[in-house]
Amino acid sequence: QASASRVAVSTNVACFASPPLIAMAVRIAQACALFLMLTPLAVAHRLGESSQRAAPPAPVGEAPAVGKDGAYDSKENACAACKFAATGSCAMYKSCVCYATNAFWSSVNVASETDRNNWHYACGNEGGSKYELCFSTTNTYQDMFGDKVDPNKPKCPE
């Protein structure tokens, strides 16, 4: 009886593997292979289009000098450095809100500190309440750096 069931199974398998079904399976496999080969080409073509966008904007202002200690000597210089860095990149231009903080704190047992200005900038105030906003906006058509903008000619178009 065991040999009879084996024969029945092999007969059923042979029935499902008929030549027209095999040919159809081969065509489906070929279509899938073609799709998988062409998909990366289409993606690369789309990526190539996006890489042909306009050049990044020119930074606004000049980069202030950094002190010997690696910090800026005033809040204004730290804010100017933030603006210079952020306006030269569309990603930063669209996402950076400049804040500055003085990282100086008085030390115990130090007679006199010679450098009380140790200013740094950040694109956000997540560092805490000691970070102060660099630029305020008072007009509808201003960017995050207080500069006027033309809504019909964006600095960084989409």
Image (tube, grey):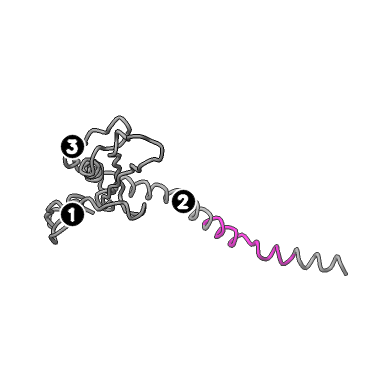
Q: Which residue is mark 1?
A: 143
The amino acid marked with disc number 1 is: Asp
Which residue appears at 40% of the width and 40% of the height?
Answer: 108
Badge nearest the viewer, 3 or 2: 3
Q: Which residue is mark 3?
A: 62
Q: Give the extent of the magenta segment.
A: 11-27
Front residue of this view, candidates 134 and 145: 134
Q: Is residue 55 above or below residue 27?
A: above
Q: Mark 1 Cα within 10 Å, few/some/many (few <14, many 20+)?
A: some
- Mark sitting on residue 26: none
> Looking at the image, do the residues carrying marks 3 and 2 touch, with CB atoms under 8 Å apart?
no
Q: Is residue 64 above or below residue 2?
A: above
> Quick check: is 35 in the magenta stretch?
no
Residue 18 is drawn in which quadrant?
bottom right
Badge count: 3
- Residue 7 lies, in percent from the top left, at 80, 65
How far separated are the C-alphas under marks 1 and 2?
48 Å
The amino acid marked with disc number 3 is: Glu
- 1 or 2: tag closer to the N-terminus: 2
SS assignment at label 2: helix
Residue 143 is drawn in which quadrant?
bottom left
Q: Is residue 102 above or below residue 17?
A: above
Q: Which residue is mark 2?
A: 34
SS assignment at label 1: loop
